Amino acid sequence: MELTVFYSEGQDWCCPRCKRHILLARPDIDEQERLFALSYAEPRWYVERLQTIACRNCHDIVSIFGLYRAQIGTDGQPQRQPTNHSKIITNHAYRQMVVYPLHLQDAYDPAVVPPAIVQDLQEAASIADLSPRASAVLSRRVVQSVMRDFYKVGKQRDLHSEIEAARSQMSESLYDALMSVKSLGNIGAHPERDVDLIISVDGSEASLLLAVVQILIDGTYVKQADDEQKFTSIKALAEEKRAQRTQQE
């Protein structure tokens, strides 16, 4: 996914659970760092960092882990991460990711979205940092499942054909988004030949694909459920008004 950022006091932070923005205070953040060296000859110094943030709104926590090379100071001694976190992280990071919670995707009602689709989406989100390529494969499967289950296109020659078959049922912006992401290689380098062929996929591309998949689900299953609820409310209101008029006559 996109570069995960360590946070500090006074920064605006959006909780991935409740989506509320919070101005972080010192009591909200706990940090632990470990400086260590590895090498048989000249030591190479590394820093492990674990930051945990508590949300004052929903009381859940988020933990971020980082592993990066330590800078060597002018005195020849290893330096811990300076105040300007991004400089060290951008140039020397080996791994930096959210380790808890693993599933940051919005929860969907199983009565609205098929549980199998939700499970694939959550698994794709949970491994996007560890294996963007595997995450892209799962996201592609979600897209294909939506094409077949919601749009009822039936099994086609490949995913490209299934998206084309459903084009008339979706907005042009959604169609363009699916095709644009597909052309990046996230859901198939050559979909007309092999929908399971995935070329190199980086974290930002896997994150982009997850966002498009979530838009797809929101624009299909969730929108349909919302519309049905509105229609039911309108019908109930109309029945209530008709009953009131009948009583007045």
Image: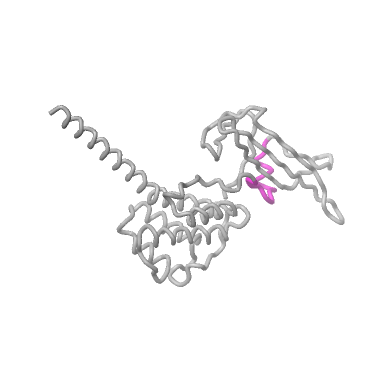
Going 56% across and 37% down the picture, which residue do you hit?
15
Q: How many marks?
A: 0
Going 34% across and 42% down the picture, which residue do you hit?
229
Q: Nearer the viewer, residue 103 or 94?
A: 103
Looking at this rendering, what residue extends furthest in the left direction? Answer: 249
Does 184 appear above or below 20?
Answer: below
Q: Nearer the viewer, residue 237 or 59?
A: 237
The image quadrant where one finds the C terminus is top left
Q: Is residue 80 left or right of residue 175?
A: right
| Colouring scheme applied when the structure was drawn | one colour
Going 62% across and 37% down the picture, which residue do you hit?
61
Asked if the stretch drawn in magenta spans residue 26, the answer is no
Q: Position of residue 214 (x, y in %)?
A: 46, 50
- Tell me which corner region of the image, top left, top right, bottom left or bottom right, holds residue 177: bottom left
Q: Position of residue 23 (x, y in %)?
A: 57, 28
Q: Position of residue 188 (x, y in %)?
A: 49, 64
Does 11 appear above or below 208?
Answer: above
- Tell me which corner region of the image, top left, top right, bottom left or bottom right, holds residue 127: bottom right
Magenta span covers which residues? 84-99
Q: Position of residue 168 (x, y in %)?
A: 30, 58
Q: Is residue 43 left or right of residue 2?
A: right
- Tell me which corner region of the image, top left, top right, bottom left or bottom right, holds residue 179: bottom left
Going 38% across and 53% down the picture, which residue do you hit?
174
Q: Nearer the viewer, residue 240 or 48?
A: 240
Q: Is residue 110 left or right of residue 14?
A: left
